[in-house]
């Protein structure tokens, strides 16, 4: 290896001067002093070489190849001896495309994404594409990025005013909250770009998107002046949609939400703007209002008993000019199977996003055994699993992630530590530092890292729930659709990644909760996992297939992974050995149309916006189910309203014919009677169950999922009512949700045969010890509704679902009232479960006579349901 001429000259001068003898080590390419042949003066012995003077500029600040920069970093920690193959592969592919403005990089959790991102930004700085910003989902993860950068020896700062950042000499590490808010230090609509960004890297893009959606949502809590004023503006419009639901909402029912009709929002938006402007300095509005105020007519408003939310159809990300104008934007993600939201919410280029960059193979992932205990043994109860996990937690740190306060309360009594936002950082550090035991976290499917022994058993208990009010509305509109299932599976996979943070890490993942398991087996939802996760799940289920039923069998499989037996490590590595990433990313065409229509309408090109959405509807025809098509036509009606209000109502009627959940038109919708006369309960069950022949476990998983949704907890009204409606089919009855589908009537109506009906009002979120006068009157009102729409030959029983059968003194229950109480509802669920298991045992030969006998035995005929599982008012 030849030294540069300048260094050779310096060395030659020193040798000629006789001050020391130089020895060149060709393997290290450095200079060191050799032994001298004579004694030198003390001052000359102490003079070190000035190595900095040997080079005009450090290569680490000029090199643009990330891999070479990695090798040149002089102060990196000893654990960074060499870059991983997957990191080098990503860097090499990025170099070829680095001038593309939007680049998506996908790597498995634990594949070293942070190192990849830091080196990419350092390369951009060296190229002069600064300032460079590394965006993490929250403050905690931003601190982890800073630590990793320091261990690498890469200069980073956390202060956006630091000269080193502004001059392009150091990276800025920040969180998404700091970048995207109405008072952003980077600038907004009002201020313009305060800090231009050359290269922007968004890490854990899926988690950052969730935060960004919240930042672009104005939330006004009930009990405040603006909440009362905005509700007053739209009260008449909401009454026309559903008078009962509005009364519930005004009574403070936090689990009931209403979407303001789009024509009312467009007509009265100026009044809303005036209210929000008057309160723009309040703490709950000031960080969000500046991001929305220029796009208010392109927003939707959802009101519940606890708050109201105003959010845009797509995120107007241009409200943060530095984000929009960044010369390069890099999105890092581990689990983003559907890239559509990068287009619809971050405004990324739909032509560039599908061209994602990935490693050559997807096998650089830690060892996870992913088990579904209640699929292995459908008889296992949640209580049995919880007791088992409590015992295991005495040896291994065990972390359970739950989706709701209801499930959090279920675990609390056995938890060694309950984690909230207030103690998250301390809890994670405690887990990393030693043994804690059983730790329960609420809704933390992303944003935490639990490497090594910090988490050896990870439990996901239940299906992640919608976070924003509009997301709850959309989930109801599209229940069971590919889009909703895909969103839920993605959040499940995010959660599964918390316990394995490196390719030499290992963890057992247990999935429990009937609603989660049911979703996994609907519409082949498992296929939506990333390739590596899918491979690990398949291998784990093959192993589980060798097990018999029971906790001991489950424990033997769990210990096989936790003890890292040679045999298990071998098959675990083989499972992912040849796994690759999809060649391209996936973007739903409707997401591209949604973004384009939103952008056009935002500049008042309403005709073009409507035309774009119409083209999307036409293209989707035949390829989507009825519910999804109705949802698309509802969006078309929203844009049509801007140019032709009469035509918008006609489009809305067409949407309603396909999806009863969409906004009802101004002139309402005619009720369709539910026929009970010809209902034959046993015969209907035979036909229903025969469809599950050869897959009886799927039948039990489906029913268990419905029964799981029938729980007394706040915030689950939609799930409870939907489950109550669907459960009727498994009991051989017909059902409706009249209040939801037609704007009036009970929550649920069952036609149980012989012209008999159950008029059901569901108050699953009730917390009072007594039934209020309001609830009693509502049930009586639903009975009056029934008598107006059904003739005298039809009979109905008023059924209330409420924790208590005790009515307050001022309440007068209907004469036929019966109550599914907190005591009786679990018994009803247990008998349904036992009935289904009995049918499963002989499903191939199931006939009406046998089913009728089982119905009688388990008390599931209409009259016995009332007698055995409901109570009279008290």
Image (cartoon, grey):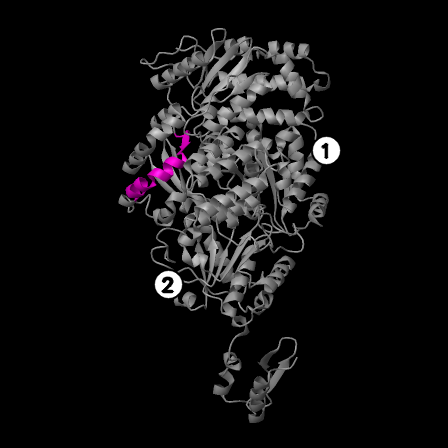
**Mark 2 sits on what residue?**
161
Q: Nearer the viewer, residue 535 or 352?
A: 352
Instruction: Give left or right: position of 444 versus 229.
Output: right
Quarter containing the C terminus: top left
Residue 775 percent location from the top left of the image: 38, 18
The secondary structure that most of the magenta stretch takes on is: helix
Q: Quadrant of residue 197?
A: bottom left
Residue 745's place in the image compared with 318, above or below, is above
Q: Secondary structure at mark 2?
A: loop
- Magenta stretch holds residue 262: yes
Q: Is residue 230 at all visible to an observer of this figure? A: yes
Q: Quadrant of residue 251?
A: top left
Q: Pointer 2: residues within 10 angstroms few (<14), some, or many (20+)?
A: few
Residue 692 percent location from the top left of the image: 68, 24
Q: Residue at x 55, y 43 (%)?
A: 616
Q: Secondary structure at mark 1?
A: loop
As drawn, the label of residue 546 is 1
Residue 508 percent location from the top left of the image: 61, 40
Sequence-wise, the earlier of marks 2 and 1 is 2
Q: Nearer the viewer, residue 822 or 719?
A: 719
Q: Residue at x 67, y 35 (%)?
A: 556
Quarter containing the N terminus: bottom right
Residue 448 percent location from the top left of the image: 50, 47
- Magenta stretch holds residue 209: no
Q: Nearer the viewer, residue 756 or 157?
A: 756
Q: Which residues are magenta?
A: 254-276
Instruction: Give left or right: position of 440 versus 809.
Output: right
């Amino acid at each position: 290896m030849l030294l540069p001429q300048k260094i050779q000259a310096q060395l030659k001068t020193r040798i000629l001067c006789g001050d020391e003898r130089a020895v060149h080590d060709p393997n290290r390419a450095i200079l060191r002093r050799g032994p001298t042949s004579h004694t030198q003066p003390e001052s000359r012995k102490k003079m070190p070489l000035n190595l900095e003077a040997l080079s005009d500029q450090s290569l680490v600040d000029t090199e643009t190849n990330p891999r070479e920069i990695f090798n040149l970093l002089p102060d990196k920690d000893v654990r960074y001896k060499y870059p991983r193959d997957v990191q080098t592969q990503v860097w090499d592919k990025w170099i070829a495309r680095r001038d593309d403005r939007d680049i998506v990089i996908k790597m498995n959790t634990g594949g070293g994404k942070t190192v990849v991102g830091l080196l990419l930004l350092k390369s951009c700085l060296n190229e002069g594409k600064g300032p460079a910003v590394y965006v993490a989902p929250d403050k905690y993860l931003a601190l982890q990025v800073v630590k990793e950068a320091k261990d690498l020896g890469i200069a980073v700062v956390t202060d956006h005013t630091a000269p080193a950042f502004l001059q392009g000499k150091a990276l800025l590490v920040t969180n998404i909250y700091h970048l995207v808010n109405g008072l952003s230090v980077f600038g907004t609509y009002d201020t313009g770009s305060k800090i231009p960004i050359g290269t922007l890297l968004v890490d854990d893009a899926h988690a950052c998107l969730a935060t960004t959606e919240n930042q672009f949502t104005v939330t006004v809590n009930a009990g405040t002046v603006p909440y009362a004023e905005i509700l007053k503006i739209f009260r008449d419009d909401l009454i026309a949609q559903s008078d009962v639901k509005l009364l519930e909402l005004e009574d403070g029912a936090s689990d009931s939400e209403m979407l303001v009709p789009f024509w009312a929002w467009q007509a009265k938006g100026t009044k809303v703007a005036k209210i929000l402007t008057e309160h723009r300095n309040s703490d709950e509005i000031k960080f969000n209002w500046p991001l929305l105020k220029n796009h208010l007519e392109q927003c939707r408003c959802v009101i519940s008993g606890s708050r109201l939310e105003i959010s845009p159809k797509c995120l107007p990300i241009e409200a943060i000019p530095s984000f929009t104008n960044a010369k390069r934007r890099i999105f890092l993600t581990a689990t983003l199977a559907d890239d559509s939201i990068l287009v619809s919410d971050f405004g990324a280029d739909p032509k560039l996003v599908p061209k994602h960059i990935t490693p050559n193979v997807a096998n650089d992932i830690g060892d996870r055994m992913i088990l579904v205990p209640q699929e292995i043994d459908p008889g296992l109860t949640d209580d049995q699993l919880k007791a088992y996990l409590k015992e295991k937690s005495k040896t291994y740190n065990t972390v359970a992630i739950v989706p709701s306060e209801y499930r959090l309360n279920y675990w609390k009594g056995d938890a060694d530590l309950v984690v909230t936002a207030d103690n998250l950082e301390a809890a994670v550090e405690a887990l990393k530092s030693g043994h804690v035991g059983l730790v329960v976290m609420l809704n933390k499917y992303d944003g935490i890292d639990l490497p090594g022994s910090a988490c050896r058993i990870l439990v996901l208990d239940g299906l992640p729930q919608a976070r924003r009010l509009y997301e709850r509305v959309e989930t109801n509109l599209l229940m069971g659709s590919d889009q909703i299932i895909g969103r839920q599976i993605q959040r499940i996979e995010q959660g599964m990644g918390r316990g394995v943070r490196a390719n030499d890490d290992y963890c057992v993942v247990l999935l429990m909760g009937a609603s989660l398991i049911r979703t996994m087996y609907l519409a082949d939802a498992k296929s939506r996992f990333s390739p590596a996760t899918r491979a690990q799940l398949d291998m784990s289920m093959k192993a589980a297939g060798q097990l018999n039923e029971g906790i001991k069998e489950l424990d033997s499989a769990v210990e096989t992974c936790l003890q890292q037996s040679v045999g298990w490590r071998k098959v675990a590595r083989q499972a992912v050995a040849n796994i690759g990433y999809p060649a391209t990313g996936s973007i739903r065409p409707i997401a591209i149309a949604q973004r384009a229509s939103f952008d056009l309408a935002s500049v008042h090109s309403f005709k073009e916006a409507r035309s774009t959405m119409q083209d999307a509807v036409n293209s989707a025809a035949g390829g989507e189910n009825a519910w999804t098509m109705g949802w698309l036509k509802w969006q078309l009606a929203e844009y049509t309203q801007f140019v032709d209000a009469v035509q918008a109502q006609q489009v809305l009627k067409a949407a309603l014919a396909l999806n009863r959940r969409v906004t009802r038109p101004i002139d309402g919708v005619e009720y369709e009677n539910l026929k009970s006369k010809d209902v034959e309960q046993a015969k209907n069950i035979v036909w229903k169950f025969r469809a599950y022949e050869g897959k009886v476990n799927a039948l039990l998983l489906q029913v268990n999922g419905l029964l799981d949704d029938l729980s007394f907890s706040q915030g689950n009204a939609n799930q409870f009512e939907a489950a109550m409606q669907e459960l009727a089919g498994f009991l051989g009855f017909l059902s409706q949700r009249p209040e939801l589908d037609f704007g009036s009537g009970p929550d649920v109506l069952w036609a149980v045969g012989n012209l008999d009906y159950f008029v059901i009002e569901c108050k699953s979120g009730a917390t009072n010890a007594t039934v209020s006068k309001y609830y009693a009157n509502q049930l009586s009102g639903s009975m009056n509704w029934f008598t107006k729409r059904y003739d005298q030959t039809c009979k109905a029983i008023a059924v209330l679902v409420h924790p208590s059968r005790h009515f307050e003194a001022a309440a007068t229950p209907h004469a036929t009232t019966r109550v599914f109480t907190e005591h009786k509802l679990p018994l009803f669920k247990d008998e349904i479960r036992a009935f289904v298991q009995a049918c499963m045992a002989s499903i191939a030969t199931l006939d009406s006579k046998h089913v009728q006998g089982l119905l009688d035995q388990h008390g599931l005929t209409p009259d016995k349901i009332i007698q055995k599982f409901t109570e009279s008012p008290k």
